Amino acid sequence: MSKIKAPHVFTSESVSEGHPDKVCDQISDAVLDACLQQDPNSRVACETLTTTNLIVISGEITTKAKVNWQEIALEVVRDIGYTDTNVGFSADDAKVMICIHKQSPDISQGVTAGQGLFKEQGAGDQGMMFGYASNETKDLMPAPIYYAHRIVAELARLRKSQPKKYAYLRPDSKSQVSLRYENGKPVALETVVVSHQHTPDMKIEVLEELVRKVVAKVVPASLRKGEVKYYVNPTGRFEVGGPDGDTGLTGRKIIVDTYGGVGSHGGGAFSGKDPSKVDRSAAYMCRYIAKNIVAAGLAAKCEVQVAYAIGVADPLSINVDTYGTGVCSDDAQLEKVIRKVFDMRPAAIVEDLGLKHPGNGWCYRDTAAYGHFGRPEFPWEKLDRVDDLKHAAAALKLI
């Protein structure tokens, strides 16, 4: 029986690349990219902290790569748009502190093939990871987070592509989207909240007009029927922002990074972690599986959970929940389909998704703002297992 809820409103938020936590995520992932480019077997667990004109890069990194950590961090800050020395955080003034050491040998023996108790590469840690997909948007993402991302991404695109016209915009911003659902589907945009850092001379009416234009561009007209409530910089002013206004840390925006509060979350962050960490790679794989299941027509919504023990390659469990939208009489049957089609051992995930070799239009830093999912440039978003899933389900006489 379907678990479709009564009419309700669901809200998700996003933050821009200039948000202090996202600055940290991007620095950590830029460090990862630099390491993998020279040494695909790098082991990286990079954490970044930012505050007023200070960047601290810490963590465990074992690599043969020769990397200028400070140069990478400041390049990220400059690319984001923190170049004004009057705002308390800029690429020209920020000091960079490096506190990096090598990966613990106790962890290394569990995730390196041929070491530890097992011959093959095991999971980098215990834990559970989730992936989710829904047919309510073209990229099979929940609609509230999907449009929240696109609002702040479009504002950033305008700020960077037309710097003179939008000189009043500074890098830090947040969005929030509330959508009304009926019969399990989004039917109307109810509320939009946008807070955007700005110059002292900006008039709020100018920003309000811009936000309405952006929403009209990125949210379909079919959802913008009726009256939409807008709250733009509801406190009145947002001049002090970025790491000068709030300390940033890697890994604090895990719901923004995933599905906006829809579905479940295992608790692990992504950015700054090389793909031997199943917190990241297995979450990507679960999204890959869930998306292909929905695209195959086996469910309208799908959540996939996997669990691991540190050093052990085979997952301890796989669980599927289609929220009553699956074509099988029992969601547990889809686990059999998944096991026939996908190899969920850590080394196989890394190989299948090409996670040691970012390229061909994507890098890890790209994932660190505007969501890790629902963006077709990433390999875990490809829909190349749809036929395999259909054939496996048919062979098991599930459809």
Image (spheres, rainbow, N blue to C red):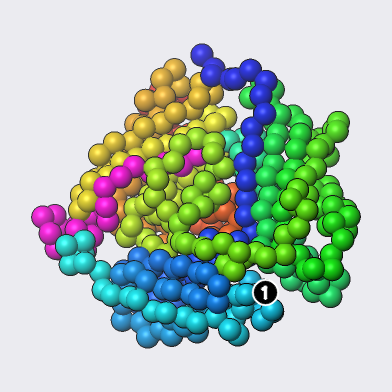
Residue 156 shows in the view: no
Residue 385 image point, x, y percent = 48, 44
Which residue shows up at 20% across the image and 53% down it? Answer: 311
Name the secondary structure under disc 1.
loop
Residue 70 image point, x, y percent = 47, 83
Residue 244 shows in the view: yes
Query: For this rendering, which residue is in front, 55 or 215?
Result: 55
Which residue shows up at 50% across the image and 57% down it? Answer: 379
Q: Is residue 206 magenta?
A: no
Left or right of 200, for residue 329: left
Magenta residues? 110-133
Query: For this rendering, which residue is in front, 294 or 105?
Result: 105
Residue 22 image point, x, y percent = 55, 62
Q: Is residue 160 above or below residue 70?
A: above
Residue 4 image point, x, y percent = 58, 20
Left or right of 279, for residue 133: right
For label 1, the crowd category at 10 Å Cα-Cα, with few meaning under 14, some 14 to 19 and many 20 or more, is: some
Q: To which residue does mark 1 refer? A: 87
What amino acid is found at the position of numbered circle 1 in the picture?
A: Val
